[in-house]
Amino acid sequence: MMAFLNSTLSRYLGRLYIIHFLSLLALLMGVIYLFEMVELLRRAGKQGDVPLPTVFGMALLKLPDVATTISPFAILFAGLYSFWQLSKRSELVVLRCAGISVWQFLLPIILSAMAIGVVMVTVINPISATMYTQYSVLERLHLRKEQGNVIAVFKQGLWLRQDTEKGYAIFHADKVEPDWRLRDVMVLSFDHENKFESRIDAPMALLKSGHWVLRDAVLNVPGTTLRKLEKTRIPTELTTKDIEESFSSPKSMGFWGLTSFIDTLDATGFDSTRVRIQFQSLLSQPFLYAAMVLLAACVALRQQRQGQTLIFLVIGVMTGFIVFIMSNFLQVLGASHQLPVFLSAWSPAMIFTLLGAAVLLTLEDG
């Protein structure tokens, strides 16, 4: 009978928490969607020729990315609200009178939060990456009016397309060194009618301000003999930052494709630290969600017994921002090679789990 009661109670607490999480997440996404729409309409108004349905579609494409960003806040606030509701209806008092410890009624909620984390990582994140990529394309075409530059990285090397005065050029390099020297470079030039004009092969190309510098190159123009060029320049508007951000933005990579993309970056010579941190952060996300539930319990259970609702709300909001700021700060340290990748990604989950458990052990008789 007790096992059935515990099973029924666990399902009730888990279902209650999931309902509160989904409700809060939908509410937060709705509010953010309105603000995003206002911002996109403002930017579209400056261009003057962006269709309204396109703007609405761009805001919708960004929603899954918003969901992955605000989900830790929703986890925390859902925990706060769930404990507040249980306290308001005196269900916590009944649970304690029945001899159920704080760890027993927290367990189904923690497991529910971790299950949400697994779904967010394995399902929502890949969807978010795909839709964010589409959003980035529409933003570049309609709001930034950038159409010419396309950059991709594969195991075979770097491929880059850029506009030129006569048409466009396609670059290929087998490897990229840290100082932005491209090795074994091939440049194919085309006119505006997509007609092939020339090919340049060079052992090395260096990206400098406003141009590519190719040394010891060989120029091949159809109908003419090969020409050796000791040094030639190709104008470009690209910068190293443009190239890095175009293909290494963690938002544009789904969970299931991160490991192969890390291997590709390492093979071509690019720094894969940011992507490694993203991958490890996704792995730690279910445990971070569990830590959020523990922090919510520390705040909500203590304050509700004292009847300090305002302090309860303020501390809850501050806790969420502290977790957000600390997580981002540690990731920045990791991206700048000040911390190992594992520590920068897993530290927030470990720190706040230990902190929440220690506070509960101190305050509760468990």
Image: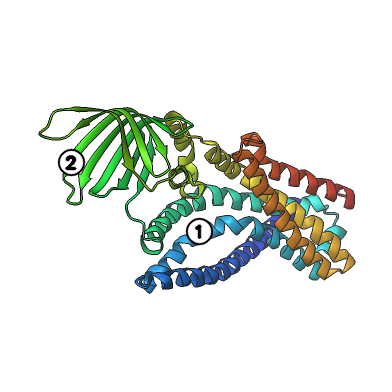
- Dot 2 lies on which element? strand
Which numbered tag is attached to residue 64? 1
* Vertical arrangement, residue 231 with respect to residue 162, above or below: above
Q: In this rendering, is residue 269 above or below 122?
A: above
Q: Nearer the viewer, mark 2 or mark 1?
A: 2
Between marks 2 and 1, how big is the CA–CA gap? 43 Å
Residue 231's quadrant in the figure? Answer: top left
Which label sits on residue 279?
none
Residue 66 vs residue 269: left or right? Answer: right
Q: In terms of depth relative to the viewer, which is nearer, 184 or 74?
A: 184
- The quarter holding residue 301 reads bottom right
Q: Residue at x 76, y 54 (%)?
A: 295
Q: Position of residue 120 (x, y in %)?
A: 55, 52
Which residue is painted at 51% across and 53% down in the image?
Answer: 124
Q: Residue at x 75, y 43 (%)?
A: 351
Q: Is residue 264 shown to the viewer in this render?
A: yes
Q: 145 above or below 195?
A: below
Could you say where residue 348 lies in the image, as x and y percent from the top left?
Answer: 70, 45
Residue matched to label 2 = 197
Residue 110 showing in the rendered view? no
